[in-house]
Amino acid sequence: MPKLLPALLLLTLSCASFASERALRFSINDSWAMPMVRIEDGKAVEGILVDLQQRMAAKVGRKAEMLVMPRMRVQHALDSGDIDVRCYVSPNWVDSGHYRYIWSLPFMTQRDVLVGVTPEKFKPEQLLNQRLGTVLGFTYQRLEPLFNSGQIQRENARTQDQVLLKLSARRYRYAISNELSLHWFNRHQAPGQKLHIISEVAAEPVACIVRDAPDVPTMALLRALVQMKQAGEFDEILARYR
């Protein structure tokens, strides 16, 4: 029995250390809609990001704390180091504050599309004197010259889902949506009410950024993301919501 005491003590200390490790803080942008995330009472309860981030945390032996916040507050949290991981982000979407973070490999591509209520095919540059449904605070690089010149006007809604709901209600004729959110929205529409892709506006590889600090298992998280990509776990998560 005395010989077992050191091993038992080590095991006890290891368990105590694991239990005391805080949860990893993941940011959730409250402008996202399903299938990216569903938010109820200020909490992220399901969606691609919830599944992805819970799995990432589990792979490094931590719990995931998902902090739902407005887009501008996400940027402030990056600047101040108040979040450990931000997923589903492109370098083109981050203004500053990412110098403390390390980028993961891209795990998927977000496609932004021009959407309408009737089947048509044309490029967004062909729009003239139209109001275009957009998400408040989102940047659409290809369209910025059109907005700045007054050729088209932004009509902002707080979330991507609200943009599509307003389009479906004919509040305007055209809107911008990411392809995943559009497909999810159309799943719940009658055949004659489905919205239509007119053309692709942009395709952005998206990744995670992980805070590089002693209290974050940065390299372990980045390795876990590589392993998930190689094992097809990203595709498995996406398939649940297609």
Image: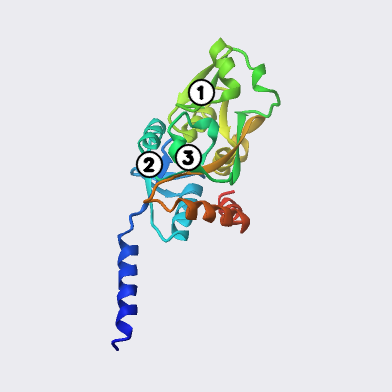
Q: CA distance from mark 3 to mark 2?
A: 12 Å
* Residue 171: numbered disc: 1
Q: Of circles 1 and 3, which is in front?
A: 3
Label 2 secondary element: strand
Q: Position of residue 133 (x, y in %)?
A: 52, 25
Mark 2 and mark 1 lie on one chain; the one further toward the N terminus is 2
Q: Position of residue 2 (x, y in %)?
A: 28, 87
Q: Quadrant for the N terminus, please.
A: bottom left
Kindly tell me whether residue 189 is visible in this rendering: no
Q: Position of residue 165 (x, y in %)?
A: 50, 32
164 in relation to 233, above or below: above
Label 3 secondary element: loop
In the displayed orientation, state which residue is furthest to the top: 149
Residue 179 in which image quadrant: top right
Name the kind of residue labelled 2 in the image.
Val
Describe residue 4's horizontal placement relative to residue 178 as left or right.
Answer: left
